[in-house]
Image (spheres, rainbow, N blue to C red):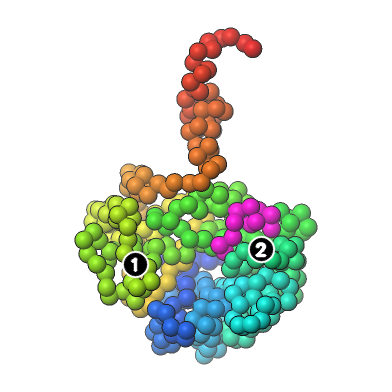
Amino acid sequence: MALDHYVTLGRSGLRVSPFALGAMTFGTDAGGAGCGVEESERILTTYLDLGGNFVDTANFYTNGHSETILGDYFAAHPGQRDHVVLASKFFTNMFPGDPNGGGAGRRSIIAQLEESLRRLRTDYLDLYWLHNWDRNTPIEETMRTLDDLVRAGKIRYLGFSNTPAWFTAQAQTIAVLQGRTPIIALQVEYSLLARTVEGELAPLALDQGMALMPWSPLKNGFLSGKYRRGAQVTDSARTAYVGQPSDAELVVIEAVLAIADELGAAPAAVSLAWLRSRPGTVVPIIGARRTSHLTDNLTGLAVTLTADQLRVLNEVSAPTLDYPAPMHGALRAMLQFAGTTVDGESSTVYPPLLQRGDVRY
């Protein structure tokens, strides 16, 4: 598989690369662990030259510098913008003291979009993400505004990020029943070290035909291969922020390292290949502060994990999910199927029924 082996993003007609390029690291404004303009442009050029077409940013990344870098790049490369799926996000308030500067109300969405379009030097976005849940604004107002912007040609498709499943389902139901633009993708934290999305959001996405776009697919670099038991990583620009992996996380990391050794592959590539194996359409967002980080992560497209390797990774990283998720596996099958096999799912018999025999109540 390669970057130019495109996939359809959710229930839509939008074709994107199997890995998106995350631009959160583009720019050095507001501190952080970003990279300068020249390195950002080298990373972007490498991604595009390899066939990549999906670039993701947000209004507040490096205080708007990320969007500005992208806008300047495409302005300097005429015609290239038209062949790139460009995504950004709204929600974060970049104007201290102004309560209407952020969130998901009509006024703030329109203002945030205009600011992003100005920095990106484009007149439309291919995908516009709600970056977080605005509990102070009716979802009807948010969805109506976004639909109006689609009809006006300012945005093409909608996505939600970091929102509760019930809220996302409510928004999608409103869109479907009122004939408004639906949500085609969810941007979520998802990796071998962060699997709680499998409790509610991942099943919702699968049911509704939404793509999942994992952010931090290497869990802050923990799955990159440089974190190992007994070794303290001090050269990472984010070490002070993310700390060191826990003992439980190191168990998962060691399983990844062992499989990477078996395959002669990078641990990051194994971790990204595992994400690509998950049900539905999963398009990880890979970030980079150096061009070498990008090319190393792209090797994940060349890795195919065996059924046994997937079983090992699934078992060692199995998450503890909140109720009612524990009721939806073997216990559900036991209560529902009574020892039969339905749609390929086998079950045992609920123990009290073993005492019933053929008695009919």
Identified by mark 1, the residue type is Gly
Q: Is residue 69 left or right of residue 134?
A: left
Q: Which residue corresponds to mark 1?
A: 243
Camera-side residue of 64 and 275 = 64
Q: Report whether residue 320 is seen.
A: yes
Magenta span includes 168: yes
In the image, the segment drawn in magenta is 161-171
In the image, what residue type sits under mark 2? Answer: Arg
Q: Is residue 356 above or below residue 58?
A: above
Vertical side of 331 occupied by 175: above or below? below
Evaluate whether residue 66 shows in this view.
no
**Mark on residue 218?**
none
Is residue 2 or residue 140 the one in the foreground? 140
- Residue located 39% across and 74% down the image: 288
Q: Please tell me which residue is depicted at 69% across the width and 54% down the height of the picture.
A: 170
Residue 239 in the figure: left or right of residue 138 = left
Position in image of residue 198 (x %, y %): 50, 50
Q: Position of residue 338 (x, y in %)?
A: 53, 23
Magenta stretch, main secondary structure class: helix
Residue identified by numbered label 2: 135
> In this view, which residue lies farthest toward the front?
97
